Amino acid sequence: MRPLRALGAALAGGALTLAAACGGSAGKDTSAPARTVTVEAANGAVTIPATPKRIVSLSPTHTETLFAIGAGAQVVAVDDQSDHPAQAPRTKLSGFKPNAEAIIGYKPDLVVLSNDQDGIVAALGKVKVPVLVEPAAAKLDEAYDQILDLGKATGREADAKRVTDDMRNRIQQEVAAAKPPKSGQLSYYHELDQQFHTVTSKTFIGQLYGLFGLRNIADDADKQGSGYPQLSRESLLQDDPDLVFLADTQCCQQSPETVAKRPGWKDLKAVRNGDVVALDDDVASRWGPRLPEFVKAIGGAVREASEGK
């Protein structure tokens, strides 16, 4: 029946050809690539052009992902906080206070966000600009899923899968290589700033530490359940963590040397044993393709501390 339908369609269009008469391709070419793709994001099912050519990223994590999966050439602008990789087209666009008019000026066929700040999704929707909202991951699997989403959105699905597979393998290897001490569970403190704001085990960052079986000294201090409590200096010194991780080395110029000069800190086990770890602030705060680097830093610290016990 397919040749007859093709013949009828060709007759109706006045374009009868020998190929059509023989059941050729005068009808719709089902082998042609799709013109759009639909991605399930936090803001629902978003239909975008297949392989968009003018992407604007207003999230440092997603900027890293886009370049990691090979879609960097499709990115025409990124926000002012997107500092990796170096070749990303950094602009004055803000991800915290997005300006629809400024974004539209780049003529995007896709905008990627981590938050719908100030109703930017609706504002861009009025001019038919597709927007993907991929918020901060709460679990490791969500981080992988978002990378796969961006792969689908940019026509880089195979590349995205290669990135996530590599991330999984590297993280699994680091966890397997880190052997906890026989003397007991190691405790840790993850510093966000000099006012002792930190994270608990229920946060995304805390879950990465949890891969190594570490005990978070901040868990009992989180009375509000925010996941980001502020410790007192006295409680931190009393808890005396085995490991201290500094995620304020760039923003606040903290280091193992500077924290050792804080009142009371020279007596902490982590300081005495050289188990204060200086992290890259950006790597420790983003949930993209550089996650294995963060996990590697944790694993290395666990191995060193374990060998010293």
Image: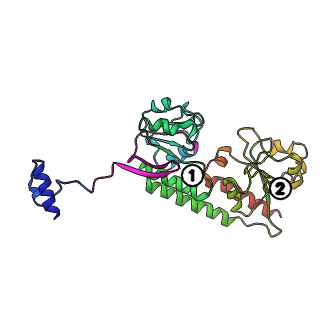
Magenta-colored stretch includes residue 183: no
Determine crowd level at label 1: few under 14, some 14-19, many 20+ residues with C-alpha closer than 10 A: many
Position of 28 compared to 139: left or right? left
- What residue did someone put label 2 on? 241
| Residue in the image at 56% along x and 30% along y | 92
- Residue 231 percent location from the top left of the image: 82, 47
Q: Where is residue 263 in the image (x, y as percent from the top left)?
A: 90, 43
Q: Is residue 80 visible?
A: yes
**Vertical arrangement, residue 111 with respect to residue 147, above or below:** above
At horizontal 80% and vertical 59% (from top left) the residue drawn is: 187
Q: Name the residue under label 1.
A: 289
- Residues in magenta? 31-60
The three-letter code of the residue at mark 1 reads Pro
**Chosen colour scheme:** rainbow
The foreground one among 201 and 270 is 201
Closer-to-camera residue (296/111) = 111
**Residue 23 in view in this figure:** no
**What residue type is disc 2 on?**
Pro
